[in-house]
Image (cartoon, grey):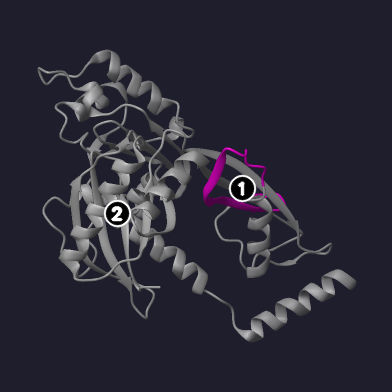
Amino acid sequence: MSKYFAAINTGNTRIYAAGASWDRSGDYCLHGMVNIPSTGFRKGSVTDASAAADSLSRAMDKLREKTGRKIHDVYAGISSTSVGVVRSSGVLLLSRHGREVQERDIKRCVSIGSTIKVPLDREPLHRIVDGFSIDDEREIDNPLNLEGVKLAVKVNIVTVSSSSLNNMSKCIAQAGYLPAGFAFSGLASSYRVLTENDRRISAALVDMSEDLTEVMVYRRGVLAGCRVLPLGTSDIRKEAGEADQAELDKLVAGLISVPGWDRVSKIILVGEGILAENMIESLEKVFAFPVIAGTCMVRPFEELPPDRGGYISSLGLLDYLREQRRKKRRTGSLLKTAVDRGVSFLDRYF
């Protein structure tokens, strides 16, 4: 397996790809970025497998020419109108007499809370913890070392249609690359646009492309709801440059329908929606909170092109992958593991 990989976003009229590799610290090194016109995709779905595979192949060839690296693994952002959030919960009995919550308890509780029956035509993309509770105390962010009898968790599970995932995987394979993983492109974009404060104050990230609008709503720092609306700037913009009121009303109705929208206090708009004439002003007239243009954050020592706004999802996907790798590398000490096992033995037999 090559250590070089690519993160791509195809949910637009162009394919944006970023080439990178992992270093020893678990961080990624960005080697180059390219974008080309996209064919075979429409509204986030594969409409022509052969054309889509050809587009991906051309993007990877151009990325290889720019970086000088041979890439095998491809991670892709998924943007489909089938994306949605399913809420789940779980409860773990810690001890009949109560004790401190250990790391293993948290993992087991999240595992229980994430175990749901997903329809055969859908696949889980992300399992996002939406808070814990210990006995009667709720909205706990981190229960580690707190005491109680029962530990409960709420989990938001982002799902997508199996066909969308399978078709994208086949196109990547047909282009000659290994489909290494997938993530909701809207969630990936949030890593490059939203600050921690934005997530805490219940901000909504609205990413408008030519034919799609991705909406992510955050509450208390966690993704509370998301939806991909099948309309974009090409549907709303009239020839004279003014907004089509009927289509704008559809957009507003779609935004309001996203779970958690009733608590939104700020909209951050990115993508082609920023360039659409009067889009920010039009949304501000409807909602009683600010609508601002978002930007792609630049990480330390990064050199990004002037058109970095188009790479928001691809770069955010790299950030997401880095976070997932670091979570897997976090392991407890041998002494702590031995103590945890001893506590588990006492809880079971005494």
Location of residue 228 (image quadrant):
top left
Q: Position of residue 305 (x, y in %)?
A: 13, 57
Q: Nearer the viewer, mark 1 or mark 2?
A: 2
The residue that disc 1 covers is 154
Q: Tag 1's secondary structure?
A: strand
The crowd level at tag 2 (other Cα within 10 Å; few <14, some 14-19, many 20+) is many
* Residue 219 appears in the rendering: no
The residues tagged by marks 1 and 2 sit, at their Cα atoms, a distance apart of: 29 Å
Does 34 sit left or right of 126 as displayed?
A: left
Q: Name the quarter where the N terminus is drawn.
A: bottom left
Which label sits on residue 221?
none
Does 330 sit left or right of 26 as displayed?
A: right
Q: Position of residue 61 (x, y in %)?
A: 22, 59
Does 130 sit left or right of 43 as displayed?
A: right
The segment highlighted magenta reads 116-139
The residue that disc 2 covers is 314
Asked if residue 334 is among those painted magenta in the image, a careful observer would answer: no
Q: Residue at x 25, y 27 (%)?
A: 284
Residue that extends furthest to the bottom in the rendered view of this protein: 335
Which residue type carries mark 1? Lys
Q: Position of residue 81 (x, y in %)?
A: 42, 33
User: Residue 244, relative to residue 295: is it above or below?
Assistant: above
Q: Tag 2's secondary structure?
A: helix
Camera-side residue of 70 and 271: 70
Q: Residue at x 25, y 14 (%)?
A: 245
Camera-side residue of 312 and 224: 312
